[in-house]
């Protein structure tokens, strides 16, 4: 049985640490998404760390661009990107300002607002699938590029807050290669998840995309 989550908001200092410390420490925390229709709360169960210019798998590996600007900003903000012309993915920026790093939110359990999430995720076969994967997670929460740069540290009028929740015991944290990351970035075991949690997405190795002829 999961204990009642602690609703104390995480501070900016929580995120102002190395990404490899923040990422596993986010497991069990609760992300709150405030919408006009009501709140949705997500217990985080799977994440991936991306270490900026030190990491070939990171959007910031080749430096600052208009797309990844938020990654260089203050910690505790949301970095949203659009991928494959179809999906949005959501990250939480961490580390000191000026040094890009972020944690990709890959999966979670909807613990409040499931009825709202179901309306956005009509193809989900059950509630465990509502946010099982990064694109499903953003769909369930109603996240798109308009929310890029939003504060996730419970700032006034922010659409996000991150709560203390129920931190996961170290022996329940699993790690392995990041999903779909190729090349030198594919060797890092920087994907973290809660062992045996049914909301965690399946691992998939990188598969090169074939160009249409």
Image: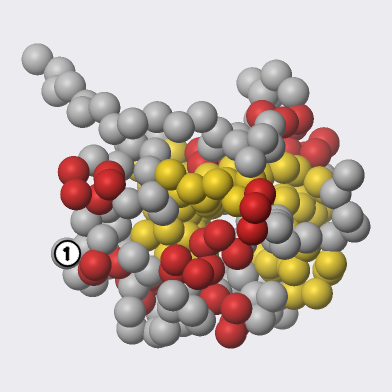
Left or right: residue 17 versus residue 129 is left
Eyeballing the image, is 59 above or below 196?
A: below
Eyeballing the image, is 206 above or below 8?
A: above
Left or right: residue 133 versus residue 2 is left
Residue visible at 9% across and 15% down? 213
| Residue 85 visible | no
Residue visible at 60% across and 37% down? 200
Q: Give whichever of 171, 46 is nearer the camera.
A: 171
| Residue 179 visible | yes
Point out residue 166 in the picture as x, y percentages from the top left corner: 78, 60
Name which quarter of the figure residue 212 lies in: top left
Name which quarter of the figure residue 183 lies in: top left
Q: Give whichever of 169, 19 is nearer the camera.
A: 169
Residue visible at 83% across and 68% down? 7
Residue visible at 63% across and 41% down? 195
Point out residue 173 in the picture as x, y percentages from the top left corner: 60, 51
């Amino acid at each position: 049985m999961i204990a009642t989550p602690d609703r104390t908001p995480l501070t900016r200092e929580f995120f102002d640490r190395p990404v490899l410390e923040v990422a596993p420490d986010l497991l069990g925390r609760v992300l709150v998404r405030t919408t006009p229709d009501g709140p949705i709360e997500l217990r985080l169960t799977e994440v991936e760390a991306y270490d900026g210019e030190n990491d070939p798998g990171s959007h910031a590996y080749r430096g600052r661009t208009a797309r990844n600007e938020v990654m260089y900003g203050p910690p505790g903000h949301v970095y949203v990107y659009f991928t494959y012309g179809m999906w949005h993915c959501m990250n939480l920026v961490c580390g000191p300002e000026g040094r890009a790093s972020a944690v990709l939110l890959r999966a979670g359990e909807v613990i409040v607002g499931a009825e709202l999430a179901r309306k956005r995720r009509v193809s989900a076969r059950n509630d465990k699938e509502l946010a099982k994967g990064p694109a499903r997670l953003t769909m369930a929460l109603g996240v798109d590029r308009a929310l890029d740069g939003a504060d996730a540290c419970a700032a006034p009028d922010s659409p996000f807050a991150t709560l203390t929740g129920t931190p996961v015991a170290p022996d329940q944290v699993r790690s392995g290669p990041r999903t779909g990351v190729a090349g030198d970035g594919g060797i890092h075991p920087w994907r973290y998840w809660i062992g045996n949690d049914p909301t965690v997405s399946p691992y998939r190795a990188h598969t090169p995309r074939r160009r249409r002829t």
